[in-house]
Amino acid sequence: MEIQKKYVLSPARQLTDTEQGLVWRKPASHKVSEEELRICREVKRNWNRGEMKIANILLEGDAGSGKTQLAKALSADFGLPYTKVTCFADMDKSDVIGSILPVLSSDQLESMETSDRFVWEALQKSDGFQSAASILMDVLGVTREQAATRLKQLVKQVEEGAGKEAVEYRFYPSEIVRAYQEGYLLEIQEPTVIRDAAVLMALNSALELDGSINLPTQVIRRHPDFIAVITTNRDYAGSRPLNEALRDRVQHTEKMDLPSKEVMIERAVSKIGCANKPVLDTLADTIIVLDQAARANAIKGVAGMRSYFYWADAVATGASVKESLYHKVIYKITTDSEEIRLLEEALQRSGKLSALDELESEVKKNGMLTS
């Protein structure tokens, strides 16, 4: 179902070529969900209703339940550029607002080690479109957390080496500020892992519908098209309950669970090209039983859509059904022997082990099961 044009929020807005390239393009495998339709209807209905506007959305659920896929789909539906920030435990306010970095002379650059000079040159050549952390992520191929740590180390080295020499500085806005100021759809991944209360306070302030962000260089107001989509896992290791003040600023929430079996099968057909629905049905049933068993036994891992896709893809190309079950699904949930035993018992009680044995025989007999 094509819904993109129906829910574009600012039809008269002219995006730059760069911004147009950031609007997500739905792949053929994307299937519009009830959650997507519900959010689109609610946001569009309230978009010009002042204080009733919906511009902060929370997607909360298990890993693999499609939260990021949905956030990206909303970018396509609303016609807004998509960007994201992945939160980490030691985030500080500079990761929310941006970084003030020294501007180095050619002599200073020449005196640096090659690896450090490479990074600084990339920073100083940037047009300011990307945040400093994003530039380091691209240049060094590291995570956002590693980039933030590396950035702090580099700044400290430069400032210590400068001594009493005057240092010129340049402000690099964060990805959050960029989205906030330019009117993008920003996915904020896992804010529940943040430890510093000051960082959460900065986010809280920014998410007010009439909010603003105090930068070192200016105060910026929230762009009327800015949408924040917060995605967070339930019971994720290292996470805490979502900050109450942050949750209070959300105007619409979706509880993201494993989709219905019918939707799982439909997505698998599109995703991996396997049209053997009886096989996909058996695998989906198994995933559902494992998901329920993990919850019932307080096992932290999740049997989700990603596991289902990779397992179905392996089986479709002739892999052992039972062997690939462990490598694609069970070991992703847990490698603890006692927890694995509990999962196996759940499969045995539900009759799914027998069904998988029958499917194993069929695979050995007929080979690939792509049709």
Image (cartoon, rainbow, N blue to C red):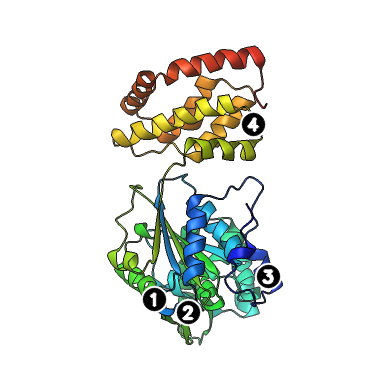
At x 63% / y 12%, what residue is drawn?
A: 365
**What number is the disc on residue 222?**
2
Task: Assess whether mark 2 and mark 1 are in contact (beta carbons under 8 angstroms).
Answer: yes
Crowd tier of the residue under label 1, counting other residues whose Cα lies within 10 Å: few below 14, some 14–19, many 20 or above: some
The amino acid type of the residue labelled 2 equals: Arg
The residue wearing badge 4 is 274
Q: Which mark is residue 18?
A: 3
Mark in the foreground, 3 or 1: 1
Residue 145 point in image, percent of width and height: 46, 59
Q: Which of pointers 1 and 2 lies earlier in the amino acid sequence?
A: 1
Tell me the SS state at disc 2: loop
The answer to whether residue 362 is visible is yes
How would you rate the neighbour count of disc 4 (Cα within 10 Å): few for under 14, some for 14-19, many for 20 or more? Answer: many
* Quadrant in the picture for residue 21: bottom right
Q: Residue at x 43, y 79 (%)?
A: 50
Measure how far apart labels 3 and 1 are at the Cα level: 27 Å
Label 2 to label 3, Cα distance in Å?
A: 21 Å
Q: Secondary structure at mark 1?
A: loop
Residue that appears at 30% across and 68% down: 245
> Few, some or many C-alpha atoms within 10 Å of disc 3 (few <14, some 14-19, many ≥20)?
few
Lower sequence index among marks 4 and 1 = 1
The residue type indicated by label 3 comes to Thr
